[in-house]
Amino acid sequence: MTDAPSLLLGLIGDNIARSQSPRLHRLSGAQNGIRVRYDSLIPNDMGASFEEVFDGARTGGYRGLNITYPYKEKVVGMVRVDDPLVRAMGSVNTVLFEPEGPVGLNTDYTGFMASYRAIRGHAAPGVVAMIGTGGVGRAVAFGLLGLGAREIRLVDRDPARAEALAEALNRADPDLAVSIWIEAERAAEGATGLINCTPVGMYGHEGAVLTAAAMAGAEWAFDAVYTPADTQFLTGAEQAGLAVISGWELFFFQGVHAWKLFSGKGVDEARLRAQLIGQEDAA
């Protein structure tokens, strides 16, 4: 592929050393005969602010960026957001550097919906307790709207952040029942679905936002964390008999959707999945 077209991409975030995003995009490029360089850009390690790293990518020949924790909300004010739904979310995880300026999009939203349907089909989410209302939480909450959730219970240590998301959700759907809770265990009582959208459970942030006992009676659980895929939260959910939706699925689908935005090309999803989990030679 020495004469193949090339694509320069990157991921800005903290604690991303174990991210599989570089590999996903390089494999997607290989399927399409495109040489991909995908850089992990960690502001703290680079001795720079998020704004400085973002601006360096904007002027440094990058086609686009993925944005992850904790910058998905911060970047919104630095890009043009054309999609009214993404504007309502107030969270961006994908940026395209276009001639007229950077454009912000969100594939966490579509990625979550695809992940849910892959496990639960067309079953309605029911009453959902969602812990964490930051960048990925905002996208997942709007995904729940698209899936037909009738009630969402928001849990966050920062009530103001939860209130801001509640207001955004009610502007999008005035009939949705949204409430704000401080204690995750109380919010989980009687819920159909349980969601973790905090960093708790990822490498460097071990633990779980709910115990297995607190999950009893629910039907399904989703964890936005995917490194590791078998988080303590999901292990507890399995012990409690819930259907489990791994954060790896969200990672996969948001990446596939972002790749199409970056390149304009599709991928063989089954082959890419097999390559990523080591069932097929990536060569």
Image (cartoon, rainbow, N blue to C red):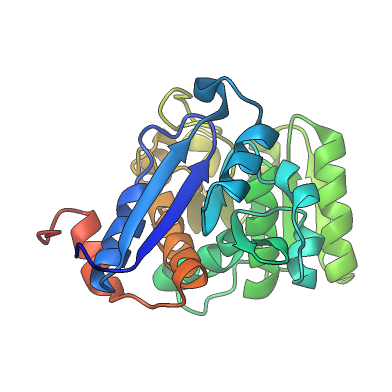
User: Image point 67% across, 54% down: which residue?
Assistant: 92
User: Image point 57% across, 19% down: which residue?
Assistant: 47
The vertical placement of 100 against 250, above or below, is below
**Viewer-nearest residue: 255 or 264:** 264
The vertical placement of 261 against 245, above or below, is below
58 vs 38, left or right, is: right
**Viewer-nearest residue: 17 or 206:** 17
Determine the image quadrant of residue 28. bottom left
**Can residue 275 be seen in this snapshot?**
yes
User: Image point 63% across, 57% down: which residue?
Assistant: 140
**Can residue 21 be seen in this snapshot?**
no
**Viewer-nearest residue: 2 or 256:** 2
The x and y percentages for residue 39 are 41, 43
The x and y percentages for residue 110 are 56, 69
The x and y percentages for residue 134 are 69, 42
The x and y percentages for residue 166 are 84, 53
Quadrant the N terminus occupies: bottom left
User: Image point 70% across, 63% down: which residue?
Assistant: 142
How many numbered discs? 0
The vertical placement of 140 against 257, above or below, is above
Extreme-front residue of the structure = 3
Quadrant the C terminus occupies: bottom left
235 vs 9, left or right, is: left
6 vs 197, left or right, is: left
